[in-house]
Amino acid sequence: MKILTCPVNGPRPIQEFAFGGEVRPMSDPADLTDEEWADYVFHRAGEPALKREWWFHIASGTWFIAERDNVTDEIVRTYLWGDR
Amino acid sequence: MKGQRLPPQVGEWIDRDQPIPFRFEDERLVGLAGDVISSALWANDVRMTGRSFKYHRPRGAYSMAGHDANTMLSDGVRTNLRGDLTLLQPEMDLHAVNTAGGVKGDRLRLIERFSKLMPVGFYYKAFHKPRWLFPFHERQMRKVAGLGRINPDFESAASPKDYAWCDVLVVGSGPSGLGAARTAAEAGLTVMIVEQEPALGGSLVWQHGRDELARQQRLDHVRALQKHPRVTIRTATTVGGVYADHWIALFDDMRMTKLRARAVVLATGAIEQPAVFGHNDVPGVMLASAAQRLVRHFAIQPFERAVVMAANSHAYEAALDLAQAGVQLAAVVDLRPEGEPSGLAGQVEDTGARILTGSSVFEARRSAGGKTVSGALLCPLDRQGRAEPSKGELMACDGIAVSVGWAPNASVLSQAGVRFRYDQRLQQLVPDELPRGVFVCGRANGVYELSAQWADGSRCGQEAARHLRVLSVDPTPVGSLRDEAPHSHSYPIFPHPDHKDFVDLDEDLHVTDFANAHQEGYDSVELIKRYSTVGMGPSQGKLANVNSVRILARLNGRSIEETGTTTARPFYQPVPLRHLAGRRFHPLRRTAIHDWHAEQGAVFVHAGDWLRPEYYAQDGASREDCVLSEATRVRRQVGLIDLSTLGKLIVQGPDAVAFLERIYTGRFARLAVGKSRYGVVVDESGVLVDDGVLARLGEDEFYATVTSSGAAGQHREMLRWALIWGLEVCIVNATGQLAAMNVAGPASRAVLQSLADVDLSDAELPYQGATRASVAGVEATIMRVGFVGELGYEVHIPCWESDHVWRAILAAGSDYGIAPFGVEAQRLLRLEKGHLIVGHDTDALTHPLEAGMGWAISRKKRFFVGQRSLQVLAERPLKRTLVGIRWPEGFAGDLPEECHLVVDGESIVGRVTSIAHRSTLGYPLGMAFVDPGFSKAGTPLTIRLSDGSTCTAQVAVLPFYDPENLRQQPPTSGDVGT
């Protein structure tokens, strides 16, 4: 069982969290063609990389970002949305 | 020799003052406290302790470390006890597991005569065709295959679960493990040391029994660890599996321990590997380390006269141990042409033993009945390493001790993520890449010399301390501690033309099986494993994998490195299921009025985590009668339903309006304070995910109901969007804090008015009005709703007041004939009114346009979640439409259930989503998704029932009940509710 570090609550077992998918900035839908919009909605990039992912600490209601290497499944760092 | 023990051995496990009587195959025997079952049997001169899996050949002690599955026993309750690892208990009544009629006369031993007819892949080939015969074959196979018999009367007690934490977990307590544990503890870390055997020491006890310095060092370290306040010692405990972030499952006889470590030192040692030669499985052939364990742990003289098969110095050490234990050494047969370079060779010769270099055991000779070794056929090896039987020499002996090589005990290492490379110099795998926080030392790391093992352990202790930042030292380079000379022969495999030469003792696989499988095209290590089942027996290839890879590499003409190895997965040893089974905990939520419901005879139904009254049972009335009577009461008089399970969100803040405009498909900017509106939420792909009522209670304050099961998810997504959009809004999930109830029916106003401090008239609180009020003295929010199609008021209050308010409303309504109604009546009432339930009438692909909810989508907004997708969908023809379906009044034929299919000939054109076999309208009705071509009112629909027959329904206009919504309008004349 993995340990995930919530930026507010510290390291916690992964059952306390819900996964929120990869961070995918949405462009203004009005500027997109149907195909570009469909690509945003339906396609996910699964290639080996350092992924930015949304995670939610259920008990405290905290959304945050985790940078995870999806090859080694190592979580490199976590931080609140808006931090860098 | 029966029952006799050697003089006391250094570090022996047995207690000579405590005899333990037990029975094996109905024979009365006596062992000693501290014996494992295998040692107690050997001490009683029982050599045949089991039968092999496929051919039912006699088998006996082989590794004495649980690395083989030769000694598998049942005590009548537990099955597949492993003789090497199970401590002897008084009055155990043991039987070998894989026999028909006992281990001695096993009737299935005759199977071996047909072994030529049962080649590798026999089951696949023989029982493939004809297909209709397979059930018969399966029954026969099940009788023969598998080990042990389950006792159906066995009642498993719940196995406790244990949790533990430490800075450093050290696995294994040989010299490197002890060294690592002590170094880490002395650096200030908390340490847990786990040892599979009942006592600490590992190879220090069984391998270095003649070494006084090793004894001193062991006692010194063990005492230091036992006294150390930061050290926990767990003996007779195995590491079953290693998971993410050093989450480790430990198993002992009683329980599983879930351990979290911050760093892991793996000092798991090495597993001595067998040699392959003719009849290499006869009881009496064993690993040299097994013979040493018999001597040192249990003070048992393993044989009378032995041949030692050697390919390293350890074999000579073992030979000297045997000689010291009184065994007559017939010969040491060394595979190496040059023999043993150290002085050990001279010491062995001094015992009177002959040393034959460049030779091998080619065949074990068997006594009559094949149950013990009677001799060894020794043959010189030619330049290619092949045995030359023509020059063979027969030597009488009752034991053959084999020491030709080692393999790192790598299963746990692999699970931890260690990557290996094959070291040509050592002829074994060595760790190459280590994950963060994982360290390997000792023989598992290719370090063989005792002083180097101590040093390697200290190095790992230091590295763990450095990793955890309590120490900064430069570690000793690993390479310098590893040995220069190989301790493993590169190909200790000597196929026999006439006799079985086993590679995998668990699965009875011999050399020919590999050649055949390879010839049939199974030429990769993963394929040959699955086809031949090598390494898939109870010992998981601990003794079979290395030799099978060697054979395959040679068959393919490739190197060991290129051939690779299979993946090791949990568990390291078989684990009783009861240690894994958890207790059945399910989250269950009850509303604050639950006890009242129960007292009133409510029949409960699970709705997500919640328990809700489905209906209230009445004496002598069927479920359908009860539901219909509750619904009818709501239509004609007044009813009360507990809605506390509704999701309830409070949305507040300067940006609350802007936020809700983006979340919901409808418009809320111009919703007046004191008004509510139905709202729909779609996801980014336009799929309908939630609905509910939003009431504006203040300029910047909204109160929203969401579906019971969707509350947590909806709240979560709202929080995320608020974050992304940077809006100043506060969203509180008040589902648990607030209770809700709906008083509905023509008399509902009169009932509630008597308790409320606000005017509930149509003028003051029209349909969709919302207000704060006091109800029965409790602060409440009242919303006028029409979900069930009648005049109705939702009353939302703190849940701790709900029992009081509930009873007050019932008391106030007694003159109007009020009664509670359950979810089933509500489901019927809303169905008559044509209201869908998200997740019931919709699925994971339903969008609002096909659900007939286009009206709930604003076309004036610049943005809401999913808007773009709905725009795309709006331009395309609908693929399906949600319609009403009905049958004539008094219809008496068979009716469908939910999810029955609407068909057109052979094609599926729809699906029933809701159905009511009886309704307050007097006819059966429901809802269905159908292809748009079938959606016109009056269209007959053919619905296929469970038994394959069909029935016909008609498409109907929704809603069935009160299409003009007159029930929500102010009355034009007369009074309502009497």
Image (cartoon, rainbow, N blue to C red):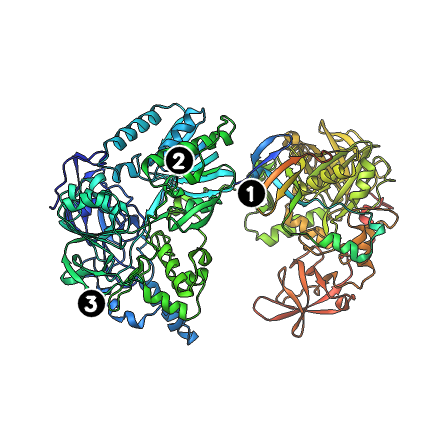
User: Tag 3, which chain?
Assistant: B
Q: Position of residue B121 (x, y in %)?
A: 38, 68
Relative to B542, is B729 above or below? Answer: above
Where disc 1 sits, the SS reads loop
Distance of mark 3 from mark 2, alpha carbons?
47 Å
Dot 3 and dot 2 within a common chain: yes
Give the residue at mark 3. B390
Q: Position of residue B198 (x, y in %)?
A: 29, 37
Crowd band around label 2 with a 10 angstrom C-alpha radius: few (<14), some (14–19), many (20+):
many
Give the residue at mark 2. B456
Of badges 1 and 3, nearer the viewer stands 3
Where disc 3 sits, the SS reads helix
**Residue B601: numbered disc:** 1
Quadrant of residue B270 in the image?
Answer: top left
Q: Nearer the viewer, residue B752 or A46?
A: A46
Relative to B355, is B890 above or below? Answer: below
In the rendered image, the quadrant that contains the C terminus of chain B is: top right
Q: Position of residue B435 (x, y in %)?
A: 51, 41
Q: CB under 8 Å between callouts 3 and 2?
A: no
Q: Which of pointers 1 and 2 lies earlier in the amino acid sequence?
A: 2
Left/right placement of residue B93 relative to residue B969 reads left
Crowd band around label 1 with a 10 angstrom C-alpha radius: few (<14), some (14–19), many (20+):
some
